[in-house]
Amino acid sequence: MNILKELVYPARCPMCDEILLLGTGKICKACRKRLVYVSEPVCRKCGKPLQKMEEEYCGDCMERRHYFKEGAAVFSYSSIKESVYRFKYEGRQEYGVYYGEQVRLRLGQKIRMWNPDGLIPVPLYRKKQQKRGYNQAEILARAISKEMDIPVYNNLVVRIRNTVPQKELDIQARENNLKRAFKIYQNDVKLKTIIIVDDIYTTGSTMDALALECKRSGIENIYCISLAIGRT
Ligand SMILES: [Zn+2]
Ligand SMILES: [Zn+2]
């Protein structure tokens, strides 16, 4: 039955989207060689890869404080850019299964140590989600949830407007940009420790905006995980 299914709907490599030969595994051989995982040295705060072993923090984290405790990511963004693009904009939601497994394999130990009560995917602005049909961060969070048996809280927080990249704003505008992006209607479940989940981490402004809102609603420990992270 499975073989029949694979003949009709052949599995595709979640990295290059080519059809996978039977028995190849989850990704194709060429992509396995190309993949770049985030590895030490990394920024102690946001998890971004660093150039030198003796550095502790990335340039971004030296400049400003974040509202989350610590962050971690699986892949270097440049090595899975196309894959994430298809996952996000071209309906390749099935990639989430592979991504979720990679999060468990690479970050599972760290996640267990953080001991979260739940995962909160970064919500999309409502109109954006209606247009796209799904929220890629939610798909990723659900995949991690399945791998690690941690509940997802998807309706706790609402995005009330889009965040503008922080770099384009002056200090005052930055503050406002952070303040009004998300709203938590109630923290009825009384979560104490959560992990915010997103597909890509760049400057951390989105994570910060959401982390700040989580703090305000009484969540004490906020961590974040992203599938891919860029260099500063
Ligand atoms: Zn491939
Ligand atoms: Zn950093």
Image (cartoon, helix red, strand yellow):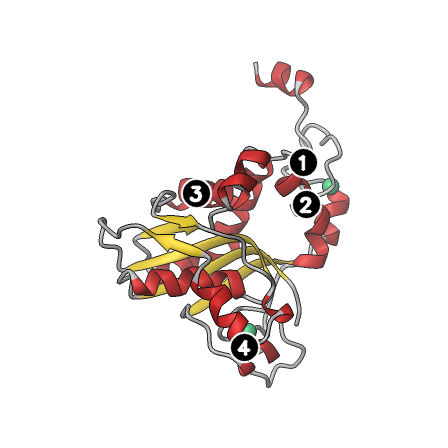
For label 2, the residue is 85
Q: Does residue 60 appear left or right of residue 45 in this picture?
A: right
Q: Residue at the spot x=64%, y=69% of the render?
A: 168
Could you tell me how far apart the alpha carbons at marks 1 and 4 are, in whole angstroms? 35 Å
Q: Nearer the viewer, residue 52 or 174?
A: 174
State which image quarter holds ligand 1: top right
Q: Give the label on residue 147, or none.
A: 3
Q: Which structural element holds mark 3?
A: helix
Q: Nearer the viewer, mark 2 or mark 3?
A: 2
CB atoms of marks 1 and 2 within 8 Å: yes
Q: Position of residue 57 (x, y in %)?
A: 55, 80
For label 4, the residue is 171
Q: Nearer the viewer, mark 3 or mark 4?
A: 4
Q: Residue at the spot x=71%, y=32% of the render?
A: 20
Under mark 2, the amino acid is Tyr
Q: Position of residue 136 (x, y in %)?
A: 54, 42
Under mark 4, the amino acid is Ile
